[in-house]
Every structure is written in structure tokens, then in C-alpha cells.
Image: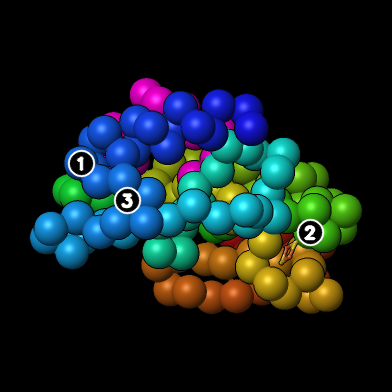
Amino acid sequence: MRGSAKVLEEMEKQLGIRAGETTPDMEFTLEIVACIGACALAPTMTVDDETFGKMTTKKVAEVLGDIKKGTDKKRGIYICQGTGCVSGKSLEITEALKKAIAEKNLTDIEVGFTGCRGFCEQGPVAIVQPEDIFYAHVTVADVPDIV
Ligand code: FES
């Protein structure tokens, strides 16, 4: 859907493996999943705990390059964009976070997203990296305290 087959094909080409296989250095295993709960951002992929949305064949090289260089783990606030959290206004929270961070000129902090984390009943949820701080039942009113 939405180009995921081409993204998978590019990933297989760049890693030199097929879906279901692991690279000889054991660094990457490529798996296909049915859904990570972030359909609005499709095609998506996850690497460890990080989610990458709106993937394109061009972004494959960029993401793999960052992972290999160890620069993929950024300092940031990641809001769940799964359908449960979106219905709890996670998109509005994301925009409020971006605005608050820009106002404070915190240029080293990224505002990103994740797919469903499996805590839908506690949503919207947010995670602050690299500290792994987890926030549940986040609202726009919580944004100043989080930032
Ligand atoms: S939709 Fe956000 S945790 Fe499931």
C-alpha cells in the first residue's frame, strides 16, 4: 500500500538480503508486518523502537546511513500517531510541541512520532528520548510542562 512494496524492494537491495533474512554481520533482520497502527503515515517502518513514516525509496538510504553511523537516535519527543492516540488529539499535541520548541529555540530537539505503542487506553502517549520518559493521557495543556 502507498508504495510499501517499492520501499521493501529498496531495503532488500541496500541490505543485500530478502525479507525474513538477517545480514551476515547480524546487524539487520528484515521483517514484514501487517500493521503498526500508524496507517496515516504509511508507508512506515520501525527500527528498534524508532518509527519512520512516509517512507520513500530515497529515504531508505538516508535512514540506513544514519543507523550505520549511529546518528539515528536523536534527542526528541515522540508522540504516538496510532489511531487511538490520534482520536485523543495527538496531532494537535504534536503541533503544540513543535510550536513550543520553536518558541524556546530548542533546535536540537526533534518532535517526531511513533506507531501504536500498545498503550491505547492510556493515550495519547509520548516518549522523550534518549531518556525513555513515558507520558500517558497527554493533552495540549501538558505541552509546556513536557518541554
Ligand atoms: S494508538 Fe497510541 S498507544 Fe495505541
In magenta segment, residue 67: no
Determine whether the residue tagged by mark 2 lies in a helix, strand or loop: helix
Question: At label 2, which amino acid type do we have?
Answer: Cys
Q: CA distance from mark 1 to mark 3?
A: 21 Å
Q: Earlier in the sequence, mark 3 or mark 2?
A: 3
Q: Position of residue 121 (x, y in %)?
A: 83, 75
Q: From the top left corner, tell me how far across and down residue 130 is, in percent.
A: 40, 67
Is residue 53 rendered magenta in the image? yes
- Disc 3 vs disc 2: Cβ atoms closer than 8 Å? no
- x 79%, y 45%: residue: 92
Q: Secondary structure at mark 1?
A: loop
Residue 48 found in image quarter: bottom left
Q: Which residues are magenta?
A: 52-66
Mark 2 residue CB less than 8 A from any atom of ligand 1: yes
For discs 1 and 3, the disc positioned in front in the rendered view: 1
Instruction: Pick whichever, 110 or 10, lies toward us.
Output: 10
Quadrant holding the C terminus: bottom right
In the picture, measured across the screen, residue 146 lies left or right of residue 91, that is left
Element class at badge 3: loop
Q: Residues within 10 Å of mark 1 (few under 14, many from 20)?
A: few
> What residue sits right under mark 3 in the picture?
72
Magenta portion: prevailing SS class: helix
Residue in the picture at 65% in, 39% down: 41
Residue behind mark 1: 16
**Circle 2 is placed at which residue position?**
85
Mark identifier at residue 107: none
Question: Counting other residues with Cα less than 10 Å from the Cα at mark 2, is it few (<14), some (14-19), or many (20 or more)?
Answer: many
Residue 131 in the image: state x and y as whole percent: 43, 73
Q: From the viewer's side, name the closer residue of 4 and 145.
A: 4
